[in-house]
Amino acid sequence: MSLTKQEFKEFYDKVGSEIGWDFSKVRHTSEGVEWELYDEVIKRCKKPDILLDVGTGGGEKVLKIAQNLQLVIGIDISDGMIDTARKNLLRSEVKNARFFVMDGENIKFPDNMFNMISCRHSDFSPTETFRLLDKGGIFLSQQVGEADKKNIKESFGRGQAFGVEDGTAMKDYASRLKAAGFSRVETLEYDATEHYERPEDLIFLLKHTPTVTNFGQDSSDFEKLEDFIKQNISDRGIKTNSKRYMLIAEK
């Protein structure tokens, strides 16, 4: 089961108005994480560069790296997310970031405007990405693999990309990026082990992400959650996995 674009927008609006994508209070550990998107952006960017962040959410990630660039622009389809991002900007000391409500499939900026484009856990348009990047520009996207939180989705019998073969979206995106005109497209993957320290940490994740579709609306969800925790808990916490892939494309 997967969410339609409108369902995603409504979901993101709700999350955006509540917390953005700041999950910093969730207590969990990860083993096997091989990279993080915005660390990779920093490695590749130069101070004069202009970065576009597609699906920026509450802007927390790009605000932390803005000092490494001339200008950071974050866009998101959700009004709630951008409202949160602008509030986060006001609370920060960052002067070179701007946030706009904008559909990633119809981005209102001129051709070749950006040196880099990033996209974390959000859909994007390969053709728009190619159009917006300057020659030699780089696109980096970190996405959630179909096998993410596999044991959770199996326990509930539903969830984001449940039943879809792992790697399907990655291969499709890579093919579409090549078709859009990118000269080089690279893919990377990792499957990390995660331990959530307390049940409330896992519940926060499930309520604020689409991992399990409409979590909590089914009367049996909390019974299923209780069974899942009993089967997957240890002295290290409640075990699941984090499957991620990265797309790196050069114009």
Image: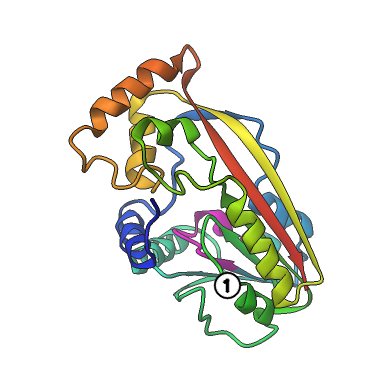
In the picture as drawn, the residue positioned furthest to the bottom comes out as: 110
User: Is 19 inside the magenta-drawn segment?
Assistant: no
Vertical comparison of 56 with 133: above or below = above
Q: Nearer the viewer, residue 93 or 247?
A: 247
122 sits to left or right of 183:
left
Q: Nearer the viewer, residue 149 or 203?
A: 149
Q: Quadrant of residue 15?
A: bottom left
Amino acid marked by disc 1: Ser
Q: Quadrant of residue 4?
A: bottom left
Q: Position of residue 135 (x, y in %)?
A: 79, 79
173 sits to left or right of 237:
right
> Crowding near pointer 1: few (<14 within 10 Å), some, many (20+)?
some
Q: Residue at x 29, y 57 (%)?
A: 14
103 sits to left or right of 128:
left
Q: Residue at x 62, y 88 (%)?
A: 110
Residue 142 shows in this picture: no
* Magenta stretch bounds: 53-67
The residue identified by callout 1 is 125
Q: Position of residue 6 (x, y in %)?
A: 34, 67
141 sits to left or right of 105:
right
Colour treatment of the image: rainbow
Q: Residue at x 21, y 43 (%)?
A: 217
Q: Quadrant of residue 153?
A: top left
In the picture as drawn, the residue positioned furthest to the top comes out as: 235
User: Is 64 inside the magenta-drawn segment?
Assistant: yes
Q: Position of residue 188 (x, y in %)?
A: 72, 48
Vertical comparison of 216 with 84: above or below = above
Q: Nearer the viewer, residue 239 or 36?
A: 239
Q: Which quarter of the rendered picture does the C terminus lie within?
A: bottom right
SS at circle 1: loop
